[in-house]
Image (spheres, coloured by chain):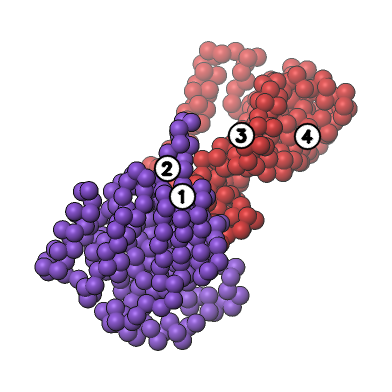
Chain colours: A purple, B red
Amino acid sequence: MKTKLTAISRLKPESRLKLEPRETILEIRNLRKVFNINNAFVTVLDEVNFSVKSGEMICIFGRSGCGKSTLLNILGGFITPSSGDILLNGKGVSKPGPDRCVVFQEDTLFPWLTVKENIAFGLKGRTTEKKAFGEEVERFLSLVGLSEFRDYLPREISGGMKQRVALARVLILKPKVLLMDEPFASLDAQTREEMQNLLLSLWGKLSHTVLFVTHDVNEAITLADRILVMGKDPGRIREEICVDLPRPRSRDSSAFLRFSRKLHEALRD
Amino acid sequence: MKKRAVQTDNSDFQIPHPAFQILPWIIPLGFILLWFVVSETGMIPTYLMPHPAEIGKTGYNYILGNPGEGAYAGRFLNDAGASLMRVATGFALAVILGLPLGIMSGRISLVHRLMGTTINALRAVPGISWLPLAMIWFGIGIKTTVFLVALAAFFPIYLNAAAGARQINPLLLQAGAMMGVKRLRGTFAILLPGAMPHIMTGLRLGLGISWAYLVLGELTGVPNGLGALIMDARMLGRIDIIVVGIIIIAVIGRLGDQLLTTSLRACFKSARRMP
């Protein structure tokens, strides 16, 4: 596992685009979710079908209230779907587990643990070898650039740093799919861009599969291999846009603006 | 622990400014001064409130005197030891029962539903009402006292543990679940630390009320203990001994609270690091 990781990490992020995505890792079939709100049945998701290939970066894009967060919560195992299947490597999944880790929008770090202890939390009790455990924690501390802040408590660091910790504490578990629920939405514009770059560079090094929920047009185009546009009432995937731009993607390029127009249009109708 | 570059919210409290050290003692010292003045000027007669110097003498004799020199000389160690033993036993029983039940009731609605009514009904019964029953059940002596202490300390410990477990951010538990944390580890690594500020409040309230019920339990004619001392002195009209007893209970109560908070902070990160 480790040799594979280091081999990939030598590749630059840009060159990963040329790596043809491999086998299908996640498959969603006929997913449907009906909520009972005050005795009225509201269909939040209907006929949601898509599949994700290993190592892909997918953005689920849509306006607020279209059910994209519900979809992510179902994939994370926090909400049970009304019907439909979620297949991870061909096997059905339902309960939350470290194979589908989530980075939440809100601060969900453990406030009584330091940065380092938060990152080590999930790994604890898994690795028996103490030395390897320590090295792994150090590696992820430095991957997200927080080595100097290892002994700080969550309340002593900024919002952007908290999300770095949140990212590191799940990446260290080597999840099959990383689920991100508008993780940068509450950050300022500059920090958000930094975090997007960090995510891309980590993705280049670790080549994990990412499902990223966002309502931000630029964020979706900056990050995604493919954008799944969700429509409302009921929430379903209305359009799929492949972003075949080389990375890093400049926001001023005409190609970027073309995609931006396309996404804005998709939102309108 | 490493020194932090970023100032924390409570950084004001970490700076040992000299004036800040004196602050807690201003009220007790002022009180003693006032007492001294009213005694010295004769505003309050000594049969209502003895002179502080006399209390000092009685206290010295009670604590350090040789047994046999006077009615109460040198009884302190015996009394305090007996009382501490009873408080510790009763409080420990309350923690053993109250903490797990409280945590469960805070997280499991079935347990909450099952326990709620009973607990709240029992909680309304004043401790002194239990005294006659406890004496019939357990006789006169240590058992009655321990029963009363445990009963009284149980409620604040239970209720605060339940409140603490209930108010935990559900996203923290979700985060644990998605990182593969199983139930047992989740309880000790997420639930307990998350509820720690409430738990700590409950334990402190419980320990405080333990002392109140200790005196109640010792009113029943046990030969030793601080409560027995006070009751005994009342019968003999020794108001100076009563005041000494009250002061000693106040001091031990304060030290006990300090010991409780310090040891919780020493044992648990969550108690140490929570604002």
Asked if badge 2 and badge 3 are on a common chain, one would say no
Looking at the rendered image, the disc whose residue lies closer to the viewer, 2 or 3, is: 2
Q: Quadrant of residue B245?
A: top right
- Report in which chain the residue with disc 3 lies: B
Residue A100: give x, y in percent of width and height.
48, 63
Q: Secondary structure at mark 4?
A: helix
Q: Secondary structure at mark 2?
A: strand
| Drawn side of residue B221 relative to residue B12, left or right | right
Marks 1, 2 in one chain = yes
In the image, what residue occupies the spot 25% across and 68% down? A243
Q: Which mark is residue B146?
A: 4
Asked if residue A204 can be seen in this view, the reply is yes
Question: Do the residues at discs 3 and 4 belong to one chain?
Answer: yes
Distance from Cα at disc 1 to Cα at disc 3 = 41 Å
Q: Which residue is mark 1?
A: A32
For mark 2, name the chain. A
Separation of marks 2 and 4 at Cα, in angstroms: 59 Å
Q: Amino acid at mark 3?
A: Leu
Residues at marks 2 and 3 touching, judged by CB atoms closer than 8 Å: no
Query: What is the x, y in percent for residue B198?
Result: 55, 40
The numbered mark at residue A43 is 2
Q: Give the residue displayed 83% in from the left and 34% down from the top.
A: B142
Q: Position of residue B106 (x, y in %)?
A: 60, 39
Amino acid on which disc 1 is placed:
Arg
Front-most of residues A128 and A204 = A204
Question: Left or right of B242: which side holds A67?
Answer: left
Q: Residues within 10 Å of mark 1 (few under 14, many from 20)?
A: many
Label 2 to label 3: alpha-carbon separation = 40 Å
Q: Is tag 3's residue or tag 4's residue first in the polypeptide sequence?
A: 4
